[in-house]
């Protein structure tokens, strides 16, 4: 077949867009050449249903080694004893955990989506809200911090089977020890979804969830800087508390239930090319430079939050301890939708985001979410952060002024064009 110029021209355009713009979506990042090389490899041709050494297809000797390397590197990264690297995405990882741990109608206590949680943590429009009965904790209206007293009060009243912690838009660390006390008191299992801060946790810059939370999931493409995908992990495996046994009558370990929930429970063939790319990314994250990268991400985020506050912007919780921040634009008379559209016109990419106690719909919102993982991968350091905040402020204060948006776009393109996509 002739080269598919239609598609490859579009890929070139996307390459240009990524290179010339300022990428501030908190869940995005740029991967290394070798992560991309692994993803674009012949491993995409192979079916490998099952686990290494226990497959339903022949010819899996090589992909078994690939998948085992991914598992071993991930275990080293988080100092854990068990992992499944097959989930196609974070949502699939969370789906598998609910399949392993819950019966339809069981109760989940999750972080409210409109306060920074995630769709898979119980939203009514998601499987987690449709199959289960859901309760939510949120943040304190004054401080913007997770309200653990509210979590405890609901947990003791409702006795959920699963408590989910973790967020898509929360700039502070989590008190996993407190959550474990609450879970033990009400008899719940804890799922920590660390999709956003996974890289920071791997680098030791945030609290370690693994000793307190029974099961941990993450995507691999955010701060962890790998290919799009998900994983499920445990530091300590344990006997399932429901007495589910093998055919021989021994109690099944939670790892066995989770493996079965991924395949055959909810997925078919694993994406071995993506698993190879995950393995490359985990090895990169095990290298000392990754910690330096993560430290720079946090320095850039703190500097950015301070620069926004200096200009009179309201950051939920007043600042950040991780790679992200949520800005409430109501005091500036803007909606998230207007802000996102104006910024995109100037090649600055953010996403509109609900803020806690938002009065706008999810399609409009009162806020924007910003993250520094991607620009830090491009090589941006603290000394360029004020320039970026100035550019954002100029756009937001002149959102209907086309000439000003064009002028900012030119400056954005000048700033970014000379930087590599991957500076590390
Ligand atoms: N879409 C992801 C994010 O932006 O945080 C979560 O799934």
Image (cartoon, rainbow, N blue to C red):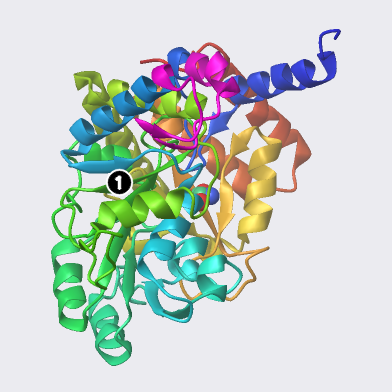
Q: Where are the magenta residues, as a range?
A: 36-62
Q: Is residue 30 visible to us here?
A: no
Q: Percent x, y for residue 267?
A: 53, 47
Residue in the picture at 24% in, 88% down: 156
Report which residue position mark 1 lands on: 322
Q: Percent x, y for residue 248?
A: 25, 59
Q: Is residue 99 above or below residue 24?
A: below
Q: Is residue 403 above or below residue 101?
A: above
Residue in the picture at 61% in, 70% down: 125
Is 45 magenta? The answer is yes
Q: Is residue 111 left or right of residue 177?
A: right
Q: Nearer the viewer, residue 226 or 315?
A: 226
Q: Is residue 236 left or right of residue 167?
A: left
Residue in the picture at 56% in, 14% down: 42
Secondary structure of residue under mark 1: loop
Residue in the picture at 21% in, 60% down: 213
* Mark 1, other Cα within 10 Å: few <14 / some 14–19 / many ≥20: many
Q: Percent x, y for residue 418?
A: 53, 11
The quarter of the picture where the N terminus appears is top right
Q: Nearer the viewer, residue 423 or 396?
A: 423
Q: Nearer the viewer, residue 199 or 180?
A: 180
Outermost residue, front direction?
Answer: 248
Q: Is residue 80 above or below residue 108?
A: above
């Amino acid at each position: 077949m002739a080269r598919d110029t239609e598609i490859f021209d579009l890929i070139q355009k996307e390459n240009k867009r990524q290179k010339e713009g300022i990428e501030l979506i908190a869940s995005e990042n740029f991967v290394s050449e070798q992560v991309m090389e692994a993803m674009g490899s012949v491993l995409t041709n192979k079916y490998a249903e099952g686990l290494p050494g226990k497959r339903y297809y022949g010819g899996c000797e090589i992909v078994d080694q690939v998948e085992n390397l991914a598992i071993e590197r991930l275990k080293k990264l988080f100092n854990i004893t068990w992992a499944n690297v097959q989930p196609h995405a974070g949502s699939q990882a969370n789906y598998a955990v609910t399949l392993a741990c819950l019966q339809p109608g069981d109760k989940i206590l999750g972080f409210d989506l409109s306060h920074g949680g995630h769709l898979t943590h119980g939203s009514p429009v998601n499987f987690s809200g449709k199959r289960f009965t859901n309760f939510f904790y949120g943040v304190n209206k004054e401080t913007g911090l997770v309200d653990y007293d509210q979590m405890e009060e609901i947990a003791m009243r409702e006795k959920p089977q699963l408590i989910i912690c973790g967020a898509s838009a929360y700039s502070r660390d989590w008190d996993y020890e407190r959550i474990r006390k609450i879970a033990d008191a009400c008899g719940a299992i804890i799922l920590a979804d660390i999709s956003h801060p996974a890289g920071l946790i791997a680098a030791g810059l945030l609290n370690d969830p693994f000793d307190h939370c029974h099961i941990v999931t993450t995507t691999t493409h955010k701060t962890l800087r790998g290919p799009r995908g998900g994983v499920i992990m445990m530091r300590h495996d344990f006997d399932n508390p429901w007495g589910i046994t093998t055919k021989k009558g021994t109690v099944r370990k939670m790892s066995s239930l989770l493996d079965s929930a991924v395949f055959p429970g909810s997925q078919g063939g694993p994406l071995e090319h993506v698993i190879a790319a995950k393995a490359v990314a985990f090895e990169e994250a095990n290298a000392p430079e990754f910690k330096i990268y993560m430290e720079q991400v946090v320095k850039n985020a703190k500097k950015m939050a301070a620069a926004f506050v200096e200009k009179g912007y309201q950051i939920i919780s007043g600042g950040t301890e991780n790679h992200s921040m949520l800005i409430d634009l109501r005091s500036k008379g803007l909606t998230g939708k207007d802000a996102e559209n104006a910024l995109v016109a100037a090649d600055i990419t953010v996403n509109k985001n609900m803020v806690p106690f938002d009065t706008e719909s999810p399609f409009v919102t009162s806020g924007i979410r910003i993250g520094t993982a991607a620009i830090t991968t491009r090589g941006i350091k603290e000394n360029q952060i004020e320039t970026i905040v100035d550019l954002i402020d100029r756009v937001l204060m002149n959102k209907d002024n086309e000439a000003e948006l064009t002028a900012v776009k030119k400056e954005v393109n000048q700033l970014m064009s000379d930087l590599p996509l991957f500076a590390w």
